[in-house]
Image (spheres, helix red, strand yellow):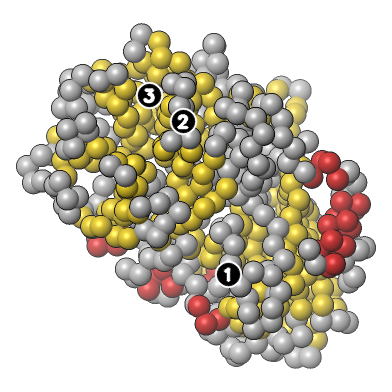
């Protein structure tokens, strides 16, 4: 560990008034829900041997379609991505529009005859929305494209026992695929069920499993009738072509937040079953919960004995190594860690971990006017209940008009930006909000409000963001979380000074459609060629 990393960790612990044990993920005999208190939406989970594999949605972030693994459903780590980048449009390169809230959605993950398969369809129109099928010998990759075909919304790939292959998608639609998965078999389209009258919204998030000879299709149901809530439903059939019957298998709020739905079920080597379902939790995004799945009268009923999401669940085994999907980084490796993702496709020759070993160098290479169009912004998830990220940055090579810093990045962002103004360096804490066109996601305006400005007399500065996603208790019960970010800077990595105001983080499905992210950035507003060196990213998470 670098000395600077150690000193910053100690300083962060002291200034947040916490003991070191509060920031260590200790092994306990229970899985505390949320299982992953971070933005991990649209899960699909499978088991191969004694290992569980999970894929989630990350939309416009690259590389995309992260694969995570766990032995105990408690400790998860990112082991790879299905693709490095998408190249169907300049929008993925932040040109001619953007891909905010689009890109990779709701990937279906399967294992069949010794190979892994993943099916995903970007939420786009035309050829950009074609369905991809990828395959790999190992979940870690490398993955290769097997085929592309027409768009299937929120679809599930399914291999039957007779080796026939299907895609189930939309609101109860199904088509059969050719044996080599190269395309659909024309004429096989089937509407396998009709939604009920009170289900005015889509039934989405198809996940198909087969158990004891029966077919089970799990979906999220949006119900707007009085007294009804978002819920997880299951359709069951003896034959894949139907008839299908329906059962509500989960209708439960949890932890003071909204009702849960969308996910899947998975079995263990011992024959037990678990449900993994996501929940919207405001600024942090859509988090994952784990719960028992009990087979009752042939239905996979989710939750505890009362059908509710439990606060905690018994892990499958004890003594597994502690792992995490959000991590600190001293940038000592020559390869970027799998815990990082770029905002849109990166420009590879505009960043480096080797030009100055032990530092992440972000170089400007395109003149833009705001962070929402800036290439090579590097992100990580934030986590609840509270977390803190800090970064040390060398700004000595910025050019006039350059902006570099650290942010709580989303469609509405709280940013710590150092701006080079002639020969001056000025640190600003600002709130920024982007406006996007509905179809092209083109940036039409960025509203910027500078809350506080400080002139720096040195080119090295430490920046920190503390995030609080704990639910806020009021006399009428639990209310949605505080979603507050606090901003700090330091001139020595030890004493921290608060800057600006507390920032209310949020979640907006019409623009980014994801939770708040830590972001490292450097961009030019006048002339390309400058750069910033990030010495270390320090991260601590509390479980209070």
What residue lies at 69% left-to-right and 26% top-to-bottom? 29
How many residues crowd mark 2 within 10 Å: few (<14), some (14–19), many (20+)? Answer: many
Which residue is label 1 attached to? 335
Above or below, 403 against 178 in this view is: below
The numbered mark at residue 261 is: 2
Above or below, 462 against 184 in this view is: below
Mark nearer the viewer, 1 or 2: 1
Q: In front here: 136 or 226?
A: 136
What residue lies at 58% left-to-right and 43% top-to-bottom? 76
What residue lies at 46% left-to-right and 42% top-to-bottom? 53
Badge 1 element: loop
Please tell me which of labels 1 and 2 falls first in the chain. 2
Position of residue 75 measured from the top left corner of the image (x, y, whole percent): 61, 40
Question: Count the marks: how many?
Answer: 3
Position of residue 197 measured from the top left corner of the image (x, y, whole percent): 29, 22
Q: Are discs 2 and 3 less than 8 Å apart at CB?
A: no
Q: In front here: 250 or 30?
A: 30
Q: Are discs 3 and 1 less than 8 Å apart at CB?
A: no
Q: Are discs 1 and 2 less than 8 Å apart at CB?
A: no
Badge 3 element: strand
Query: Looking at the figure, which quarter contains the N terminus?
Result: bottom right
């Amino acid at each position: 560990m670098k000395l600077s990393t150690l000193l910053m960790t100690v300083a962060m612990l002291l200034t947040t008034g916490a003991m070191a044990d509060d920031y260590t993920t200790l092994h306990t005999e229970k899985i505390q829900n949320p299982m992953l208190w971070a933005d991990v939406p649209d899960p699909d989970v499978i088991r191969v041997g004694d290992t569980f594999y999970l894929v989630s949605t990350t939309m416009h972030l690259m590389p995309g379609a992260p694969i995570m693994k766990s032995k105990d459903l408690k400790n998860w780590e990112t082991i790879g991505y299905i693709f490095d980048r998408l190249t169907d449009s300049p929008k993925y390169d932040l040109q001619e529009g953007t891909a905010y809230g689009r890109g990779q959605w709701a990937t279906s993950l399967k294992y069949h005859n010794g190979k892994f398969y993943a099916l995903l369809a970007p939420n786009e129109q035309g050829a950009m929305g074609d369905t991809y099928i990828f395959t790999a010998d190992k979940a870690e990759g490398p993955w290769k494209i097997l085929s592309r075909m027409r768009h299937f919304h929120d679809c599930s790939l399914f291999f039957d026992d007779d080796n026939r292959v299907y895609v189930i998608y939309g609101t109860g639609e199904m088509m059969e695929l050719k044996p080599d998965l190269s395309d659909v078999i024309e004429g096989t389209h089937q509407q396998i069920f009709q939604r009920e009258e009170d289900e005015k919204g889509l039934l989405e998030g198809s996940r198909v499993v087969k158990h004891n000879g029966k077919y089970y299709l799990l979906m999220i149901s949006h119900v707007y009738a009085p007294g009804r809530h978002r819920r997880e439903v299951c359709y069951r059939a003896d034959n894949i072509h139907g008839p299908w019957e329906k059962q509500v298998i989960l209708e439960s709020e949890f932890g003071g937040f909204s009702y849960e739905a969308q996910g899947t079920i998975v079995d263990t080597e011992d024959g037990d079953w678990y449900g993994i379902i996501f929940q919207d939790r405001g600024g942090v995004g859509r988090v994952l919960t784990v719960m028992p799945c009990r087979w009752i009268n042939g239905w996979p009923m989710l939750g505890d004995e009362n059908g509710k999401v439990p606060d905690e669940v018994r892990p499958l085994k004890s003594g597994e190594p502690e792992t995490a999907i959000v991590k600190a980084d001293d940038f000592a490796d020559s390869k970027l860690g799998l815990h990082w993702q770029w905002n849109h496709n990166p420009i590879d020759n505009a960043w480096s971990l080797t030009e100055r070993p032990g530092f992440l160098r972000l170089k400007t290479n395109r003149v833009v006017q705001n962070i929402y169009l800036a290439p090579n912004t590097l992100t990580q998830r934030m986590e609840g209940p509270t977390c803190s990220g800090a970064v040390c940055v060398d700004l000595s090579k910025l050019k006039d008009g350059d902006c570099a810093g650290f942010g709580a990045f989303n469609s509405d962002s709280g940013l710590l930006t150092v701006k080079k103004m002639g020969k001056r360096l000025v640190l600003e804490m600002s709130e920024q909000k982007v406006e996007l066109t509905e179809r092209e996601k083109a940036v039409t305006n960025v509203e910027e409000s500078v809350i506080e400005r400080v002139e720096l007399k040195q080119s090295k500065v430490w920046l920190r963001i503390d995030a609080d996603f704990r639910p806020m208790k009021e006399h009428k019960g639990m209310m949605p979380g505080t979603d507050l970010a606090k901003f700090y800077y330091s001139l020595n990595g030890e004493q921290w000074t608060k800057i600006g105001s507390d920032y209310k983080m949020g979640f907006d499905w019409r623009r980014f459609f994801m939770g708040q992210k830590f972001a490292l950035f450097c961009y030019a507003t006048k002339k390309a060629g400058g750069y910033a060196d990030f010495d270390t990213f320090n991260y601590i998470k509390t479980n209070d």
